[in-house]
Image (cartoon, rainbow, N blue to C red):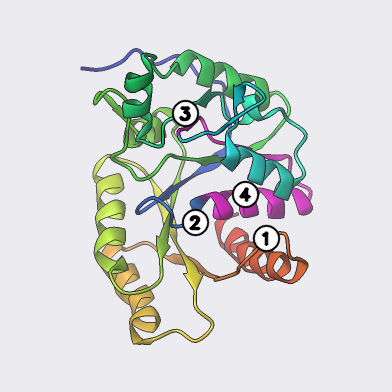
Amino acid sequence: MKLPLPPLPPFRGLFITGTDTDVGKTWVAAGLTAVLRQRGHQAVYFKPIQSGCPAEAGRLIPTDARLARDLAGLAEPLEVLTPVALALPLAPGVAAAQAGVEVDLDRIAEGLKDLAARYDFFVVEGAGGLYVPLIGLDFLVLDLIRWLALPLAVVAKSGLGTINHTVLTVKAAQQAGIEVAGVILNRYPAAPNLAARTNPDVIAALTGVPILGRLPEVGDLNRPADREAFLAAVGAVADRLL
């Protein structure tokens, strides 16, 4: 079953996905937005859908957009940066079904149209990995990327086990006709073990896409030293992407 897709405005950008949940793609997307804005680009963070949003003062708060807004110095309301917020910490399609609602693609398209009038580059973050359902089983993150027609960067962990997850993600995207810009290895240790040292070359050889960067493991983006180290590494990724 194919869903009717609303028309989108013309826009440039990059889609950030992860090999799994909790690989740090929000930090990467937020950091990339911050770096681009520091360099004078009119860049904006956009996460169409977030589940697991806590309620504050009677409304659901998309916490990923809040982190990105703070780090990148954006002034947009959170509901503009993330048009669809869901409460349950489940795949968005499942969370929406449990709440008796459906993810509204028209709302996402309207949000993109609104932001495209003010920004010239979008850093779009997905929800989980490529096969996470967004609307029933008919519209996955993979379908969202194809609808937005953006190149893809894959955020992966650095250590043991990352080869299989990362290669499968890249191959699935390529098979779906998505341009894969490369892989970002996150939380790369200061003293990498043999697996972390050898994984990048293996992943690049098996996928045919570059390793865009190895981002350091930092504890707290609110600490100036951690934030500076992280953004410096993200800056090197930006140099390779743009």
Callout 3: few (<14), some (14-19), or many (20+) C-alpha neighbours within 10 Å? Answer: many
Q: Secondary structure at mark 2?
A: loop
Q: Mark 1 vs mark 2: which is more N-terminal?
A: 2
Q: Which residue is mark 1?
A: 221
Residue 173 vertical position relative to residue 190 in the rendered view, above or below:
above
In reply to whether residue 41 is colored magenta, the answer given is yes
Q: Which residue is mark 3?
A: 87
Residues under numbered marks 4 and 1 in contact, where contact means CB atoms less than 8 Å apart: no
Q: Mark 3 vs mark 4: which is more N-terminal?
A: 4
Q: Which residues are magenta?
A: 26-51
**Label 4 amino acid?**
Ala
Q: Secondary structure at mark 1?
A: loop
Q: Mark 1 vs mark 3: which is more N-terminal?
A: 3
Q: Which residue is mark 4?
A: 30
Circle 3 or circle 4, nearest the eye:
3
Q: Quadrant of residue 195?
A: bottom left
The structure residue drawn at horizontal position 25% and vertical position 53%, both measured from the top left corner, is 171
- 129 displayed left or right of 65: left
Q: Nearer the viewer, residue 197 or 51?
A: 51
Circle 1 or circle 3, nearest the eye:
3
Circle 4 or circle 1, nearest the eye:
1
**Label 1 amino acid?**
Leu
Q: Secondary structure at mark 3?
A: loop
**Residues under labels 1 and 3: Cα distance?**
25 Å
Q: Mark 2 vs mark 3: which is more N-terminal?
A: 2
**Label 3 amino acid?**
Ala
